Image (tube, rainbow, N blue to C red):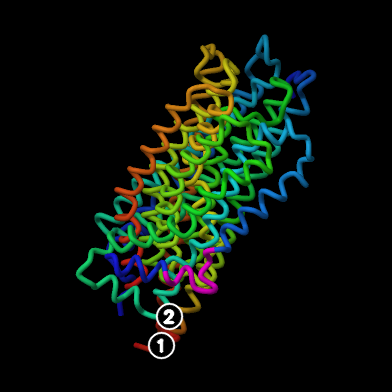
Amino acid sequence: MTALLLRDLRLAFRAGGGFGLALAFFLIVVTLVPFGVGADTAVLGRIAAGVLWVAALLACLLTLDRLFQTDYEDGSLDLLATAPMPLEGVVAIKALAHWLTTGLPLTLAAPMLGVLLNLPGPAYGWLALSLALGTPALSVIGAFGAALTVGVRRGGLLLSLLVLPLYVPVLIFGAEAVRRGAEALDPTTPILLLAGITLASAALLPFASAAAIRVNLR
Amino acid sequence: MSLWEYANPRKFMQTSAGLLPWVTGIAAIVMVVGLVWGFFFTPDDYRQGSTVKIIYLHVPAAMMAINIWAMMLVASLIWLIRRHHVSALAAKAAAPIGVTMTLIALFTGAIWGQPMWGTYWAWDPRLTSFLILFLFYLGYLALWEAIDDPDTAADLTAVLCLVGSVFAVLSRYAVNFWNQGLHQGASLSMDADENVADVFWLPLVVCIAGFVLFFVALLLMRTRTEIRARRLKALIARERMG
Amino acid sequence: MPELGKYAAEVLSAYGVSALLIAALVGWSFLRAARVRRDLAEAEARSRAHGR
């Protein structure tokens, strides 16, 4: 299992692996927003939580279609499916690798980008916490979408269409947690619900994803 | 040479061929009766004026939008467990009807909302949930279109419908939380939750029945087409190989 | 036509949009059904001619 994890991490860090891509995209989107909505700091401060969450979510999408694609094309996915390690575990490891190379860096970078959008002071901690709790869910849900579309050539756009509606609950609770933190209200409920979604998704979705991969490998 | 690959589709084609004219006829009658009754023979509402007549489209469409997705869920489960091809194809056939019902619900809701609330759209939990449901329908249809092999497509879309249903329910709660948390008391519910007077309620029930029958008739017809389409695909594939 | 009063435009456009959407759905379903029937008949004729 560790071997698979390290292999995927190494692949991601190599050129074209997408590691810096998601971070760069995150930065670009956040930079674009003031150009679109104006530089009024009061306005930016109010929408900062949501914008950061949406941008992180979109950045996660970028590297998803790569998740199973290269292994599918060169036949390693077949090998992984018949290996002694259960396919569900393979999916979980790949989702973990995706999170380590995409979600985690985004979580660490977000507070800096929060400065660009005039995120209110008390919200920074909640931003980091909500992203830390929510981005794993994004990786797991994204892995499900990637498993469904692994056989579709250039299925990136289809992947987005399938995955983005599934992201809505995570986005709602994540952004709400940050907003409440910003107004010094109690963000416990959305944080707990967010954690619940992440745990349930991580426990259950790999089964659906493995089933989808098996179907695609037939 | 067998006419059809599986006995099940053959039986369905036979049965549905007999049923279809009857269901279509009854559906047409019920729908016309309901809509004519509601449009021409009901009074205006004290508060809403003649816009209350929109209820005869909006409520049945909204109910169908949700129930059709539920039917797709059941059909997907039957396909995954029992491998009845007709089930998978019925789910595929139902989806465009569901999309249309969702659009009717959204559009009639918006048109009704403008004079009533002063806005075409509001991020009210119910409206928002319908918008999300529309997106789920689109994804389901897109996946069917993207996959070549019929059995693979049936399997993957069935899994998507399953997972999607869980997330749809989750989204419903999340959206309620999202809106309640920000805006208190914007009660924009306009349908049968309120006490709808009998004079509106009876034609409404007839319209709902009409929409259900319309769905059944169109579903039968579209499923027959899907079965034929699958047969066509198999023949073409065989031609290409031999 | 009943007295629709000041909301005539709204009510009529609601019914109009719905009618349009239903007509489009039914129309497309019929067109697709006809096309598939025709293609299937041709394919079956071809396979009867070439095969068994």
Q: Nearer the viewer, residue A33 or B134?
A: A33
Asked if the residue at tag 2 contacts the one at tag 1, i.e. Cβ–Cβ closer than 8 Å, the answer is yes
Residue drawn 49% across the image and 50% down it: B95
Q: Tell me: residue B28, above or below residue C34.
A: above
Query: On the picture, is A103 further left or further right than A27?
Result: left
Q: Quadrant of the N terminus of chain A?
A: bottom left
Percent of width and height locating residue A2: 29, 65
- Residue B241, numbered label: 1
Q: Is residue B208 visible?
A: yes
Residue position marked by numbered label 2 in the rendering: B237
Separation of marks 1 and 2 at Cα, in angstroms: 6 Å
Kind of residue indicated by mark 1: Met
Percent of width and height locating residue B137: 51, 48
Examine the structure image and report whether residue A51 is included in the region drawn in magenta.
Answer: no
Query: On the picture, is B109 further left or further right than B125?
Result: right
- Residue B157, numbered label: none
Q: Secondary structure at mark 1?
A: helix
Q: Quadrant of the C terminus of chain A?
A: bottom left
Chain of the residue on which disc 2 is drawn: B
Kind of residue indicated by mark 2: Ala
Q: Tell me: residue B69, above or below residue B205.
A: below
